[in-house]
Amino acid sequence: MLGLAFAISASLTVNPLTLSVLGALSMLFVLAFRDQSPWSRSVVFYIRLAGIVIAIRLLFRIIFNLESDPANPLLVLPEVNLGLGDLVTMHLFGSISAESLQAALTDGLRLAAIILAIGMANSLANPMKLLKTTPGALYEIATAISIAINLAPQLIASLNRVRRARGLRGQSKGIKALPGLVIPVLEDTIDQSMTLAASMSARGFGRKGTQSKARLTLTRFTGLAGLVLIAVGAFLLILSPTNQVLDLSITVAGLLSTVIYIKMSALGSLRTRYLVQKFRTGDYAIYLIAALLLALAFSGVLNF
Amino acid sequence: MITLKDLSFSYLKPNGEPVTETPQLHRVNLHIAKGEFVLVCGPTGSGKSTLLKALNGLAPSFTGGQLTGAIYIDGEDLTGKEPHDFAHLVGYVNQQPEGFFVTDTVIDEIVYGSEQLGMPVKDIATRIKPIVSVLKIEHLLERPLSSLSGGEQQRVAIASALVAGQKVLLLDEPTSALDLAGAVEVLKVLKNLVKDFGITILLAEHRISRVIAEVDSVLVVHGDGSVTKGEPTKQFNDDRFAPPIIQLGVKLGWNPLAISAEEAAELWTTKNHSFEPKEVSPAGEPIVSAKNLSVNYGSLTAVAPTDLDFFGNQITAIMGENGSGKTSLCWAIQGLGNRSSGSVLLNGSDTAELAKATRLDQVAMIPQRAADLLFLHSLGEELHESDVFAEVAEGTTAALFQKLAGRIDPSIHPRDLSAGQQLAAVLSIQLAKQAKVLILDEPTRGLDYSAKRALAKALQQLKSPDRAILLATHDIEFIAEVSDRVIRLESGKVVSDASPLTELAWPSPFASQIAQITRTPELISIGQVIK
């Protein structure tokens, strides 16, 4: 949730300083709250990705230089004319102004801050806990996601095991290495998923509730409509803030529809929840920070 | 509680014809009473698992194939229903609990089934208490599942299969991945479940020895489609899966057969028996020497610093419970594994510093899942590739394989071989170059008694003055059968290094079952007993 707020704020901000602060904050949160679980280690990957994004952004701006003869060049490189005709001001390298570089840096930073925000969400949220906090109506989707996330480490473990075993045997030159490696690993993964599915089914997952078929269809339709409306509303809101009243009303309609969907499907559901996770003060604090951040971003304060 | 009428099951080819001529199960009629504790046994691949899975709908829903006939459980007709329609009546536990867990902490896992069944929260809370106390897992409720030992995990799996008030418990080889202590714990709680809750239990097992005295009846899946059920003493006419205690009774002509160690011990003393001394090969030249070898993972000591020599002509068993460091020691000796200190010398050079090709020639290792080493499309291709890679004459590996496993059609796919045959294939591939050291990590996992006997014979044939054979396992009966020397590890430390004739004989705490029954010094394996 907080990750989402960070990402949205970052996408609306154009001030490099604010962006850096946002990125750093994401990382601080990770360092403060992460535990020893395997997915908490994925943050390293996100940091690297963010760094690479900034570097590429800068590099591209230097190579594909769109300016010709800026007022105060910072860097003067020999210009390579591509000879695309007089109308196209496209050339490689050439003089680059500080403003141009700063714009590129800001763009890169913005992307990096979004990546770091997603990374934060991913490394702090235990996918299994996701199952417990999702409303009943989204249970099936959440189950699918958490299983997919959990299969990844298992895939890596069996890949390592098979590679080690292969190293014990060695192979002659004519033999292709890949099928030998991929087949047992895939087999492992499929076996594992089948076992898990069998286990869930054997314990009652997928039992039908008391809802009629027509009701189920209506429920699903409401859910789908809600999601589409939210997506369209959010898209318009971010892209073209010209008709904010319309955009906002679409989003709100979507949200309403989703809430109705969740209530409707919860009514007919068979499942009970033992030990539902209660909100703690910390959780409220996170929602508060997220809301504050969003409000600031929308009002434009973050851009000074 | 359970009634089967004319139940048949066969796997089908894509064109709808059955894969084999004889179905896995053929017109099975059975009745199992409430509170009955039934042991299900039979040779590997005979259809034990299929029978259990048919009883909760996993077959054919998750296995494919075709099921006919009728299934009644607790008076409900469940023929043709999905597994989740069985869930309120039948709990199911398989051999690898970690792959079967859906959540990540003990308490979540235990309540998962009852949540899916829509049990009111109040009822869940009242059901949990007695179940976790019988299973002795009260102290584990808040722990993550991954931090539990195998035995603890299996008990959590049993609890989660029963919390919604299921009346039938199906267990598919629940102890096969556990060491002795873990297996004994699990069996103890099963007995209590029958006694305290009147649960009907069907238990499929390979390690029958310690279970057989506890059950009410034995159900044998013969592999030709037939299933018979009866008294424990009358069901073992087939020595492919008869445990040592039954084999001993059959050999000595006991009638009726003894099924508990106490009964057998009594029968044994009624007569004077003679036995052959066990042949233990004397140590040859030292082949490989570990000096000050240790393995640590972070702050965890897997193998404490130790000096060990392994000799030619001998099979050395490395024995110990799960997590005692057997696998780490094997990999450290092989050379690729982690080492924190020390060296392992083979012909004067350290196995960790050998060139890759030289190490492959000289040190043959068979990891826990031997089938990982097979990757081609037919047995013939595997054996041929081995000749090419080892640069030996065409047919060398095939000849070795035939010596170990008999003649087998080379066009068969390696995955269609039995576990024992796969092991023989990997053994012959790894030994094509006459390696000086052979290391096997838990080779008897998943093998029935006849496959174990075949492996024991194969290992005896592979002994030679210039080869040291190392065997890491917790299978005491197999060690008694095959080893010349026993090293025992306890949390990474070598606590004893002795002949099997003292380590596994009466009255050692690690005595083999035959030693426990006969209480005769130096008598440890059934092969020694004379009719």
Image (cartoon, coloured by chain):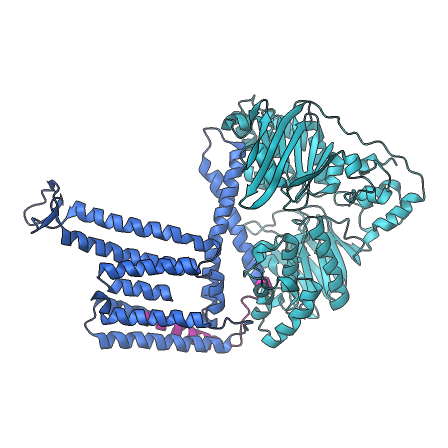
| Region rendered in magenta | A201-230
Is residue A159 visible to us here?
yes
What colour do you see for chain B?
A: cyan
Q: Residue furthest top?
A: B393
User: In the image, residue A15 lies at what x, y percent?
Assistant: 22, 61
Direction from residue B392 to residue B285 in the image, left or right: right
Direction from residue B521 to residue B316 in the image, left or right: left
User: In the image, residue B214 lies at what x, y percent?
Assistant: 79, 56
**Which quadrant, please, contains the N terminus of chain B?**
bottom right
Q: Residue at x 51, y 31 (%)?
A: A170
**Which quadrant, please, contains the C terminus of chain B?**
top right
Q: Residue at x 73, y 39 (%)?
A: B478
The blue-coloured chain is labelled A
Residue B49 within the segment the image draws in magenta: no
- In depth, the one of A92 and A76 nearer the eye is A76
The prevailing secondary structure element of the residues shown in magenta is helix
**Res B36 → quadrant:** bottom right
**Res A301 → quadrant:** bottom left
- In depth, the one of B394 and A157 nearer the eye is A157
Direction from residue B120 to residue A7 in the image, left or right: left
